[in-house]
Amino acid sequence: MLFEIDLNPFFAEFSWIPAPHWVTSTFPHYILVKTISKSCQRLTFPLATLLAIALFPFKNFAQGETRTVTVTQVTDRLTVDGVLDEAIWKEAPKIGELVQRQPDTGQAPTERTEATLLYDANNLYIGVVAYDSEPDKVIGTVMERDGSLNSDDTLEIVLDTFRDQRNAFYFATNPAGAFVDGLAYDNEDLNTDWNAIWEVRTKRTDFGWVAEIAIPFKSLNFPAESSEWGFNLERNVIRKQEQSRWSSARLETDFLQIAEAGKITNLEGLNQGIGLDVRPFVAASWLDSDTSSEDDFDAEPGVDISYNITPSLKLTGTINTDFGETEVDERQINLGRFSNRFPEKRSFFLEDAGVFAFASTGPQSPGGTPSASADVFPFFSRRIGLVGGQETPLDAGVKLTGKVGRTELGMLNVLTGSTSLVDSENLIVGRFKQNILEQSYIGGIFTNGNPSSGASASTYGVDARFATSDFLGNSQNFAVNAYAAESDNGEDSDHNKSYGLTAHFPNDKYVGEAVYRVIEDDFNPALGFVQRNNVRLYRVGLSYNPRPKSFLDIQQMFHDIFYTEFENLDNGMVESRELHITPLDWHFRSGDSVHAFGDYDRTYERLFTPFQISPSVILQPGEYTNNRYKFTFASARKRQVTAFVSGSVGDFWSGTAEQVSATLTYKLPPKFNISLAANQTFARLPEGNFITRVITSNIDYAVSPFLSFTNLIQYDNRSRNLGWQSRMRWTIQPGRDLFLVFNQGWIQDPMGGFSFQAQDTKVSTKFQYTFRF
């Protein structure tokens, strides 16, 4: 039975949020928080969902003593060179010793770390001496901006400038001096597509390595009246699989759990400037297409502007938006019945993307376990600017993100250009979250517009997250996510809703998960993504992950069992069912890992209509039960040559199949990395046999942390297309970047073999220069 819920008493609390003149002139009034809340009041959803939230036994638990350090003020700007030879570095007090998180939890690290924090009116300085008894074995293989550092020794830093204990700025580097930065949000997620202007220099020494960092206060948002920030520092020594941390080195605590950070004090007289960044750019492209006899050249200027209205509220605008420097998608051959969701890669949408995250996406499953494959995204930014596989121009966009008190806000308005497929559209998204307790919130979302047609389309949603890192006083993590959403695409339907509840117990030794979700047949968020409709999802699972003291040099074992079921809403029949079991997944102290006895998956699928799994193979309606076995080996990332191999055998729909994935990586640190990966399926079915094959190679070369070349070569036998993208990024100075991108495609001869014909050739370049005030 459904009930109409009156949310007026709750949302009345937010009626005070003002509507500045520049907002009301740019955004329709309903994008404001108060009006979002009114839209959310229309939602209907099961009373049981609300009761589950209202009766959930969360409270604020007392925390232990917070580790604190006083930052020393200096009057002169320091030279950032990785040497730490100024006298103040020796005179200033250190932050204190780090503590091992693993492998020997709570013990002193085997390699000492000495860190000092200083500041002047314009910068926060962090100097770290990472002592190492075997300095020749220090590992730093990556220089590329925002590259993955999971194979390197690292230093990681979080700064919770608002002390909200859930969001923070993130910075990381390695012995090669790589720049990695991002936004940590909701105590569990990290978006490394946020890029700040900052400095880091590292030096290898005969006693280890040294990092010197300067973070301008103009690159951060913080309340001017506060002199306390949340802070944490973590060091990883990859060859020892050793992780040490300044605050909260418990196994149950992830580094991104900002609630467990310590704090730094004495930050006074900081210069934020007026909070205005103006970044003009010039972008040009040249296209030689096999479908046109003439070359196509285009060059246009544009500008990106960001302005801090308050220290906690940022307005971002873009005109003549260009994404020519964006990486291409990685190839996939979809053997499932439902669409794949490709990740967003465009910087304008990626920055502050966490503000628009919605509870329906649920928790991340433990490593090695399958996803529930029913995440609901009321807003999915890749819907903007892509129609029918064709790019549509973005003429202008404006975005407001930040906080007002304990309320987090996100507002987005994008004007797309017209093409042969679609007229110009004005697309709007509004999001808010009211923070409650220490790590919880209640929020809402609203979208308006249809990027693929001129038809009216809106989506409304409310969500809540109740989380704690001290569940029932036992220092355990526990979270409950609940949501309800409704789409209105101009159709008269009573089946246009989705709602769900997820409980997640993500800890080191035990991981538990329970999911209930309903996605009705006509729920179709025009600016969002839904993988499958007309289903009810049940999912429950448990992972037991002990750490043996001394057994075969194993650091941790993983034993998983997860059960997932999709039920058809029309007839109550089971559509899909999966039992996933991992008897043993061993992770060794060396960093190598092996699924010792493999994974076992028993799946059931009921087809109500024919399903074309390949161009020549069509599966008929009926019931299909499969049993598959999987083996996986991954060598330690610290090695110069690394390998990953995964193979599965067993039933496959009406027949059998072998599936193999393999990746081989060679690193010549710190400048050169090359990898070759293959993903293949060999299927034999009564309806016909087929082979799918995706081959990928990455070839990366970094001259320095400021100049890098990345190459991605991909081929798949479904499209018979061979593609190559080469990207150069040169950071002339922080805030001044030059991009050069080359894309080339070839089509394989229908008879196969190594005969290819050139298709489109495209060269793009972009230069951007940031003026900061």
Image: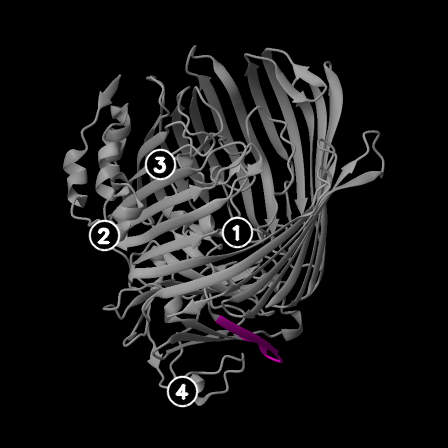
323 or 753: which is nearer to us?
Answer: 323
Q: Which residue is mark 3?
A: 447
Q: Magenta stretch mostly in which secondary structure?
A: strand
Q: What colour scheme governs how the chains and residues are painted in the rendered image of this protein? A: one colour
Which quadrant: the N terminus? Answer: top left
113 or 139: which is nearer to us?
Answer: 139
Examine the image and state in which quarter residue 454 appears: top left
First in sequence: mark 2 or mark 3? Answer: 2
Disc marking residue 91: 4
Q: Secondary structure at mark 4?
A: helix
The answer to the question of whether label 3 and label 4 lie on touching residues, with beta carbons closer than 8 A, is: no
Q: Secondary structure at mark 1?
A: loop
Q: Secondary structure at mark 2?
A: loop
Mark 1 vs mark 4: in front: 1
The x and y percentages for residue 773 are 37, 70
First in sequence: mark 1 or mark 2? Answer: 2
* Left or right for 130, reference 217: right
Q: Amino acid at mark 1?
A: Asp
First in sequence: mark 3 or mark 4? Answer: 4
First in sequence: mark 4 or mark 2? Answer: 2
Disc marking residue 322: 1
Disc marking residue 20: 2
The answer to the question of whether label 2 and label 3 lie on touching residues, with beta carbons closer than 8 A, is: no
Q: Amino acid at mark 3?
A: Thr
The x and y percentages for residue 171 are 46, 63
Q: Which range of residues does the magenta coloring cover?
A: 199-210
Can residue 545 be seen from the camera position used here?
A: yes
710 or 188: which is nearer to us?
Answer: 710
The x and y percentages for residue 34 are 21, 41
Queried whether the magenta region covers residue 297, the answer comes back as no
Q: CA distance from mark 4 to mark 2?
A: 48 Å
